[in-house]
Image (cartoon, rainbow, N blue to C red):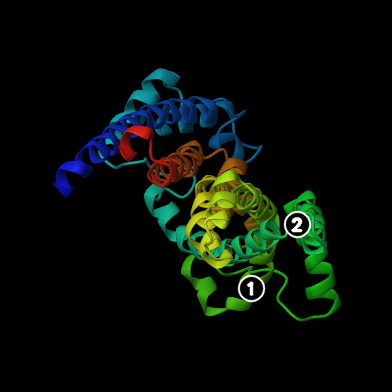
Amino acid sequence: MAGTARSPGHRLTRSYTLRRALTGLVQCGVVLVLVYFLTALLPGDSVDAVLSEMTTPEQAALARHELGLDEPVAVRFGDWAVGLLQGDLGHSLVTGLPVTQEIRDRLAATVVLASAALLLVVPLALALGILTGLRENGRLDRAVNAVVVALHAVPEFVLGLLLVAGVSLGAGLLPATAAGLSGAEVLSTPAVLVLPVTVLVCRQLGDLTRQTRIGVAEQHTGPVARHLRLLGLPERTVVLRHVLPGALAPAVQQLARCVDGLLGGAVVVEALFAVGGVGTGFVQAVQDRDLPTVQGYALLFALTAVVVNFLADIVVHRLTPRRGERA
């Protein structure tokens, strides 16, 4: 009987998951096309970036022919798509290495950087959001809101420069950059990650804190919470069993946006602090007009955003079941 009672909800959940997965596949397909053709619009190519000014037009044309850059964009896209279906992103036009290897060698540093930032942002933002939401418009609420808004208003580049000037150059407490380290090598000197992680945390802390605070405040003063209090339930029970679960859905959605923000911020932060991650690799590939590598990095960022938002939508759907699922 219990299994039968749950079956409509499970069917609705499976149906939503399938629809959302199909939507995600369509989004991935659109991303593939946009990534390729938008990067193909970049001015110049790797031949212009790598070869010297003394190179003759004939030599440049020969190099483009050998690299396949003289083929029509549609033909190159077809070859790239076929290779992509086989797990092959092509080879770097500058180093000659497979693009997957270029990304893999740098991915560890970005994963460490983003993971450290998330491990700090999530508990700190949830704690601040819950405390301020339960004390809406109080002194703590106003103080926390002022601080997180001020931190969010400062761009990553500016905040990073201020930290380097004050903490590294001024006080000499931490390394200013991670120059010379790439990939997993940053783990050998964890101190180089402190300032980059701080910048990412400060930028993402505000949105998640405010979204959590709004959700907690709405649930804490809502009609359901008031009704439970009238029934005589203690405040602790109301908060733990109703207020916090009800505030999780918007917080999860904002967390997905935080992951997107960390990916975008990593490009700026890694370039500023010379962290040898995918952000630095992406910037270098753009400078070199290394289109296969640029496309590989852009595809990684875009697909990560699609997958993270897909997972967030599934979690939110489970946290906020439809009326049919409650039957």
Q: Quadrant of residue 18?
A: top left
For discs 1 and 2, the disc positioned in front in the rendered view = 2
Which residue occupies 44% across, 20% down? 73
Q: Earlier in the sequence, mark 1 or mark 2?
A: 2
Q: Amino acid at mark 1?
A: Val
Which residue occupies 27% across, 39% down? 9
Q: Are marks 1 and 2 in contact (CB under 8 Å)?
A: no
Horizontal and vertical percent position of residue 132: 70, 60
What crowding class fits label 2: few (fewer than 14 Cα within 10 Å), some (14-19), or many (20 or more)? many
Q: Quadrant of residue 7?
A: top left
**Looking at the rendering, in which quadrant would you find the C terminus?**
top left
> 309 or 166, which is in the foreground?
309
Horizontal and vertical percent position of residue 323: 37, 34
Q: Is residue 30 visible?
A: yes
In the image, is residue 110 above or below residue 292?
Answer: below
In the image, is residue 122 above or below residue 79?
Answer: below
Horizontal and vertical percent position of residue 213: 66, 53
- The image's mark for residue 10 is none
What crowding class fits label 1: few (fewer than 14 Cα within 10 Å), some (14-19), or many (20 or more)? many
Q: Is residue 98 visible?
A: no
Relative to 2, 242 lies left or right: right
Horizontal and vertical percent position of residue 159: 78, 58
Q: Quadrant of residue 193?
A: bottom right
**Residue assigned mark 1:** 192
Residue at disc 2, secondary structure = helix
Relative to 301, 195 lies left or right: right
How far is disc 1 from disc 2 in space, using C-alphas? 24 Å
Q: Amino acid at mark 2?
A: Val
Relative to 30, 132 lies left or right: right
> 100 or 14, which is in the foreground?
14
**Residue assigned mark 2:** 148
Residue at disc 1, secondary structure = helix
